[in-house]
């Protein structure tokens, strides 16, 4: 490994190693997000697609397929599919969350409107299924439609569980699997499937994506309470203001005395939030050390991802994916 | 034909002839709309699914498959798929249109909220793709994902075209194909495809669904200006208030003098609507006889549907589908 490679971030090394494939994915995305009849569609999607997402999910699919020796063209279709599903989810999330920023820019529904976000999301979702059918592989269709259902189910579950103090860590994990890990694990798994890999390798790829996605989401939740707005493009306390019961809070509620419980009940369940409540919430998280406990959970999931990779044959891509699982938690390490 | 059959409405006769299949579709819909983890999902969908939609689209699939001699189980999956796509579209339409009624009940987003409508719609959409994959027939997946893309594209196109006085009848037709006819024609076509029918029959089934859907939508647009709220469950003038350029208005704009044009510009393009404007709009439609011209268009499409059916072998189901195309326009005949 050269010094340059050693200091480069793993997703940048992946992007370099997969550059030809990734160019093909980007070209396919541009072609397929076009709409002859409805110019509003590329207007809305360009905003998201060109905003420079890291293409993390498509790279997972490309890397998984290549690691398993795939030499055909369809990993590109599947990578574009995964990005379209992800983008559709973001668009529908914008409608839902009313958050003010996404990838450091104003969200689409502030620039356009809710109508466009819903319908253009639907369009990308339909486009993703068109792309999948072109692979002529029914198993990848099944995996990705299962993932799409799990994503929607997780988001709905979050609606009800988010403001309910009885939400357990187990339910949280279910929501996170739906919200993030389902698409990560589907992305890696379909790469193995399209390559015709052995079942134990497909299972390892799935396990890697699942654990990576969970680690990714826990880090996200953690940074929402202790991140740097400029670096993350997110506002500290967004989850708190949206009354989301994320892992640090769930752990703090479990350890709360009567007075603390009353506080969480007021701000999360009743949504009665006043000046200084966010600061008080963070003080409670620190009092019970739940930010640290949450951090340990994220590190544990990153370790699970690393372990899953070790069961696959050694390769440069395997090293990069292993490093990626370390990198996901590096911001909190 | 018995006297009883002669007076029964064609969709009721279809429901009777397809009763066993339709029971299987309803059972499958109930099973698949369930969600172990997110009870909000069946709450929202039950509202729509039990509200007694006529199951028109699923019956089109079942009838098409049976007419082509299909004896397998998968027409039931495809019929449920089509209903799920339709229901998902309604849910997302509720977010979009902010209309006060749907099938004579308050819309889901008044009972729950926009978040649920978007995400439960996504869930049903994903569920529909899961159902399709179970048929193990890639061509039906391709047809239905094409339809889903056309639906979303049509809805987006409507957003921009709806309030633009330059919208032509050709663009209107494109919107209508997206909004309504794409799912009708996919519903009939996949019935033929799953049955392994000859290509000319599949083409006739597609043409029937397309023309039936267009007639259906034009009638809907017409009744929005002259319907009976109690009978249709719609409020007269909804489209006008939402500034939709539907066919009667497009025809009236084309025939408008300068003063009339200024009126349409104010109420549709600028959305500046005052007391008495709806009545004046209807007076203009009557002055140029565009409600009658629109009615003639609907009758023409119903005739196209009837003609497509005639190219298929004679059968009881064919008679019912032919009668259905007459029935769709009977309310305006």
Image (cartoon, coloured by chain):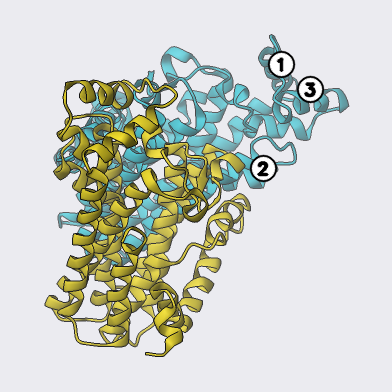
Chain colours: A yellow, B cyan
Residue ID at (15%, 34%): A255
Q: Nearer the viewer, residue A194 or A210?
A: A210
Residue furthest to the front in view is A287
Give the number of the disc on residue B169. 2
Q: Are marks 2 and 1 on the same chain?
A: yes
Element at label 1: helix
**Can residue B203 be seen from the camera position used here?**
no
Q: Quadrant of the C terminus of chain A?
A: bottom left
Q: On residue B283, which mark appears?
A: 1
Instruction: Residue A201 in the image: state x and y as whole percent.
Output: 16, 78
Pointer 3 or 1: first along the chain: 3
Which circle's residue, 3 or 2, is located before the other in the chain? 2
Discs 3 and 1 carry the same chain letter: yes
Name the chain under label 1.
B
The image quadrant where one finds the N terminus of chain A is bottom left
Report whether residue B250 is seen: yes
Residue found at x 21% / y 72%: A306
Frontmost residue, A293 versus B169: A293
Could you tell me how far apart the alpha carbons at marks 2 and 1 are, in whole angstroms? 21 Å
Q: How many marks?
A: 3
CA neighbours of label 1 inside 10 A, class few (<14), some (14 to 19), many (20+): few
Q: Measure how far apart labels 3 and 2 are at the Cα level.
A: 20 Å
Percent coordinates x, y for residue B33 in the rendering: 21, 40
Residue identified by numbered label 3: B263
Q: Is residue A164 above or below residue A28?
A: above
* Circles 3 and 2 on the same chain: yes
């Amino acid at each position: 490994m050269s010094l340059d490679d050693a200091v480069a971030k793993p997703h940048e090394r992946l992007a370099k190693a997969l550059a030809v494939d990734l160019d093909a994915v980007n070209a396919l995305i541009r072609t397929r997000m076009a709409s002859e009849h409805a110019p509003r569609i590329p207007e809305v999607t360009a905003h998201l697609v060109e905003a420079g997402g890291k293409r993390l999910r498509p790279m997972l699919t490309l890397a998984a397929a290549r690691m398993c020796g795939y030499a055909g063209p369809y990993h590109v279709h599947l990578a574009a599919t995964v990005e379209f599903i992800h983008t559709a989810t973001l668009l529908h999330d914008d409608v839902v969350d009313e958050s003010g920023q996404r990838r450091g820019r104003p969200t689409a529904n502030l620039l356009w409107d809710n109508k466009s976000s819903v319908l253009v999301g639907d369009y990308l979702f339909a486009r993703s299924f068109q792309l999948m059918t072109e692979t002529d592989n029914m198993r990848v269709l099944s995996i990705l439609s299962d993932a799409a259902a799990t994503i929607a189910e997780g988001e709905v579950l979050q609606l009800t569980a988010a403001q309910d103090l009885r939400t357990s860590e187990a339910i949280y994990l279910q929501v996170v699997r739906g919200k993030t890990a389902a698409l990560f694990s589907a992305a890696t798994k379909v790469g193995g499937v399209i390559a015709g890999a052995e079942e134990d390798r497909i299972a390892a790829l799935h396990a890697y994506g699942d654990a990576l996605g969970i680690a990714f989401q826990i880090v996200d939740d953690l940074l929402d309470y202790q991140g740097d707005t400029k670096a993350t493009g997110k506002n500290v306390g967004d989850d708190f203001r949206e009354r989301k019961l994320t892992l640090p809070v769930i752990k703090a509620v479990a350890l709360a005395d009567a007075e603390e419980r009353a506080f969480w009940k007021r701000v999360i369940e009743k949504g009665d939030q006043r000046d200084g409540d966010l600061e008080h919430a963070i003080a409670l998280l620190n009092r019970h050390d739940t930010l640290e406990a949450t951090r340990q959970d994220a590190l544990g999931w990153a370790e699970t991802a690393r372990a899953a990779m070790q069961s696959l044959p050694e390769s440069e891509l395997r090293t990069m994916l292993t490093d990626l699982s370390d990198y996901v938690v590096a911001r909190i390490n």
